Amino acid sequence: MHEAEAEALGLRCVCRLIDLARLGLGPEALPELLTAAERMGFTGLNITFPCKQTIIPLLDELSDEARALGAVNTVVLREGRRIGHNTDCSGFAEGFRRLLPDAPLGHVVQLGAGGAGSAVAEAMLTMGTARLSLFDMDPSRAASVAQALCGRHGAGRAEAGTDLTAAMAAADGLVHATPTGTAAHPGLPLPAELLHSRLWVAEVVYFPLETELLRAAHALGCRTAHGGGMAVFQAAHAFRLFTGIEPDAERMQAHFTALERSAGLG
């Protein structure tokens, strides 16, 4: 998306994939990779799972949003400094508004409170969610994120959930913010029987665009939002940080759709 949008704007942009799994590396390789990127003249880096939090101690500066969320998905390399930003929050919010306009936000259940999850939770409260119940494989992480959210948005707005079955039965919507559903982590993030037709379901996974969760939700008649909206708009906001130029988000959306279709992942 970055390369195509840059070309449309008359710029020359080269993006390179640094796939830790393919390289047989883990987050412990981040110091070496950051140094290599600086030496090779990279303008910045997009950061994804599982490095959005572990990269923070290696940076010189954080934007206010990245600091508040405790997660970074965009690093700008400028004048010898490493500056961390978070465009997941604004990217998710923009995609959600477009795909699920007027969705009821009284009680929302969210699965996942990691790097992406903390940004998505912030977006949900910013958009007006009255009560957000967070569930995570690590209950202490869900509790920590909920406490921070309440500190910014008011007591009682977020909680670490303890009974997923009860929460789902009473919820208006479900937000999924874990890696489950990707090619590397196939499957459903919760028992299918907990879904019901009154729910809307929002996904952060975008490869594939229709996850097993969304297929199950569609079968019940739920309104859904795929992860492509977040993917496009977080990228558009990162492009602005990297280049200082405002991209055409609609053009980036069209390019993303074309990529999905060509890959057979839509």
Image (cartoon, grey):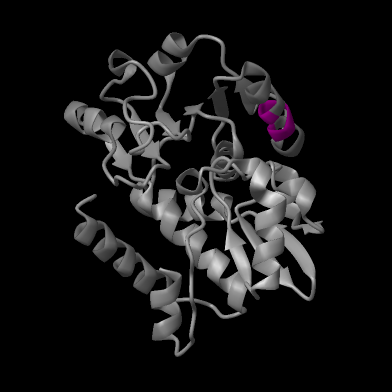
Nearest the eye: 219 or 105: 219
**What residue is rendered at 57% in x and 80% in y?**
245
As displayed, is residue 261 above or below residue 203? below
Q: Residue at the location (57% across, 16% down)?
A: 161
Is there any visible trace of residue 16 in the rendered image?
yes
| Side (left or right) of 208 relative to 84 | left
- The image quadrant that residue 184 belongs to is top left
Q: Position of residue 233 (x, y in %)?
A: 47, 60
Residue 153 percent across, percent down from the top left? 70, 37
In the image, what residue occupies the spot 62% across and 58% down?
A: 74
Q: Image check: 251 left or right of 91?
A: left
Q: Position of residue 37 (x, y in %)?
A: 65, 66
Asked whether 74 falls inside the magenta stretch, the response is no
Q: Is residue 192 above or below residue 150?
A: above
**Viewer-closest of 133 and 52:** 52
Question: Where is residue 103, by image quadrant?
Answer: top left
Give the residues drawn in magenta, as a range: 145-149
Q: Nearer the viewer, residue 131 or 136?
A: 136
State the quadrant of the N terminus. bottom left
